[in-house]
Image (cartoon, coloured by chain):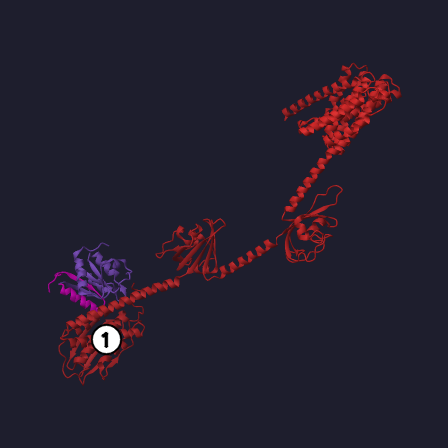
Amino acid sequence: VTARAVADRRGTLAVGAAVALGYLALALAGLSWATVGGAGSPVWPAAGFGLAALLLGGARLWPALFLGRLGAAFVSGSDQPLWAEALIAAGVSLSTAGPAFALRRWPGFDDRLASLPSAVALATASAVIATVSAAVGAATLAASSGLDRGRAAALGMDWWFGDVVGCLVVAPLILCWRRREDWRMGSARAFGLTAVLAAVGAVAAAIFLSDGLTYLRTWYLYPLVVVAALTHGVRGVAAALALIAAVALWGATQGLGPFVSVSDDPAVRVALSQQFVAIAALSGVVLAAAADERPGVAALRASEARLRAVLDSLPVGVVLARAGDGQAVFRNARAEAMFGRDGAGFPPGGARAPSGATGDEGRPYGPDDHPVARAARTGETVTAEVVRFRLRDGGAAVFEVCAAPLPAAPGEARLVVGAFQDVTGRRAAEAALAASRSTLQAVFDNAPVGILLAQGGADGVARGNAAFAAIAGGADAVALEALDLRDAEGRPVPAERTPLRRALDGAPGAELECLCRRPDGRDVWVRAQAAPIRDATGAPLAAVMALTDIDAAKRAGERQALLVAELSHRVQNALAVVQAMARRTLATSADLPTFRAAFEGRLAAFAAAHALLLRANWTGTTLRDVVDAALAPHLGGRSAQVAGPALALRPREGVALSMALHELATNAAKHGALREAGGALSVDWAVSAGDRPRVALRWRESGLSAAPAAARRGFGVTLIERTVTHELGGSAVRSDAADGLTWTLGFPLDRLGPEPRDGVGGAA
Amino acid sequence: VTGPLTGRRVLVVEDEILVAMMIEDLLERLGATVAGSAGSVEAALAALDGPPPDAAILDANLGGALSGPVARRLDALAVPFVVATGYVEHTLADPRLAGAPRLVKPFSDAAFEAAVLGLFASPPPDG
């Protein structure tokens, strides 16, 4: 900061020194026309140089003017006392510093003089500088040289014109030609300027350098000054005036030109020529400034046209309205299309709401509270307020309206801007979207299939519908990991194989039948089918999974398979039994008729036992039913005494006991109580008490004519004994009496009793 | 009776007495001695408390219960056995029974002979 300040100061000092030297040089030139020794010149280009220097470099450079003026006095060998020269230098420098300071502070001042106010301001500044400087100088010289009042006044007048001409000719010349780009122009313009200046030089020379002209023809120059001003602006005028001033001054000092006819005194002629140049310069600079202003106006118009084109291209209606009465002062193309040109649209003339305009909820606007009226009335800024109203063409429309007051330009009416965006289509689309969303939601909520929606990402929480929660047995929002899917053996399904994860990875139609382990620990069979939901580019965004409860069907299928297998097993077993029955019967039969009778009897008993079970729906049977069924084929009109407590038998034991009783009944029919006329048969049973109750079934044949033959160990007997021992875990004992025999079949009760699901379920 | 299995003692585990008696007949015709005939898991295990037989014919389903425990006891005693069952295609739930040589009921004499002779032709499978 310090180094920069030092550098700035050095720069300022260098500029100041240059300004002081420049002023000194021009002051020396001016002093050659001095009327009083060392001061009072009618030609003072230094004044314009000083003004330009302070306008460009700042009023703080005024000491440079002071030093330059003082230095010029000394160099020229002024015969004035130091105090007088100091006073004159102070008057010159400070008179310039004041207007320069004021013009630099005024934002409207264009230091290229390309506006009328700037040119007038420069002329005013010139007058101020000249007045102050000339007054101070004349008063000082009057005091120091003892001039009388008339002489002092004439000197002051010369001084005044010298300063004014210096300011109006030299300052514009410097201000308008100081930059490099000021010198850049097309060859046509350069040629035109050269031609104008050549004409000016020629006419000026003809006027000011001619001899013996008896009357003034200076006005011949005005058309050329006007041409220079209109064609090349301040630059052209400044160059032309400098040329005219130089030629006029030269002619005046050489005793040539029109002013010779006025006076013999060169000083008077110079003063006259200066007055002419002053008026020409004032006229020319002001005219040129006005001419230069025109391109600015055109640029402004072009800019405004561009702005209007931009506004017209917007899809938003833009309206500017006066805050006071709401009258529209501008509508862009879109606003005109929507509301019409006549102001009857929105906002209407008078800043009132159009009939039928309502807010988003249907509330009608009051006269002064629609958005644009509010912005006008209260100065508030309204953002995207939804307004519904009827368009010119009768259609209903929904708008989002923004309104704001504009910053007021001085002297102009306060304006508000309203922007109207037609969102009718967007609103309709949003409503359609909402409708479709609620339709989808209803489907989601009421579908009898479990539906799970999952976003991508490992920590995604999936949202399930009510059916999903019912199937999976959890809440309707579940973490993906919480869904516990297992294979038929109960092993967890790997995360990357679950349909939902595969769908999230983009796999179409992922499907899996598996077990779903519910939070309560129960496994249910489910079918999970998942599909990805893709974004516009086709990348998977989310996934939806349908979960169907197939538990009942799956388990019914399993049970069906089991039943079929069990049935097949029983048929195979029955065939094996029949096969064995046939072989053994065949092995113990003397001939085929015997075989046939025995085999058919056994097969019938076997079938009857199964028929009993079938009647009881294969849940078991009772001992009484088994006894009755075994006896029935052999009674042949006789009767048997059957007695015993009610006792349920399991199916297998029922069949076994049937087969044993069939053999007993067959023997009785062939050799015993069911054959002889006096024979009697009684079957009874009892159940013993105790921890392991046993059944004792007694088969008693009596009233026979002879004692029965000793038991032949035929197949029938073997079958009886082994059936009871083998299948019932008991014993079969035969005891013979004089008129009959008794079989006692004993077996434990714990092997009997109801057990409905024989085979099925237990076996696989 | 003498035959290929003379001197061999074979245990019959079968709940249907008629089938058991037929198997006993077939074994005796091959010269074997019936080492016992059991109609239930308990009876079979009790029969195996004595001197172990040389082989066993094992019904898969004994009165509604699978005969897996008997199969494992036979394995422990290194007794080869063939599973006689009415189950044709359905897989037996007990893996030991499912993996054993199978004799599907009803069977012919030839099938029975081949199955039983097979027990003595090769060493019993491990595990």
Q: Which residue type does callout 1 highlight?
A: Ala
| Residue at 73%, 21% in the rendered image | A64
Instruction: Say which quarter of the image contains residue A617.
Output: bottom left
Q: Give the image location of residue A490, x and y in percent.
A: 36, 56
Residue B105 part of the magenta segment:
no
Q: Is residue A93 above or below residue A672?
A: above
Asked whether A449 or A228 is in front, the reply is A228
Q: Give the image location of residue A292, x and y in percent.
A: 73, 33
Q: Is residue A651 above or below residue A136?
A: below
Q: Quadrant of the N terminus of chain A?
A: top right
| Residue at 28%, 62% in the rendered image | B90
Which residue is disc 1 drawn over? A605
Q: Which chain is purple?
A: B
- Which stretch did the figure color magenta? B1-30
Chain A colour?
red
Instruction: Say which quarter of the image contains residue B113.
Output: bottom left
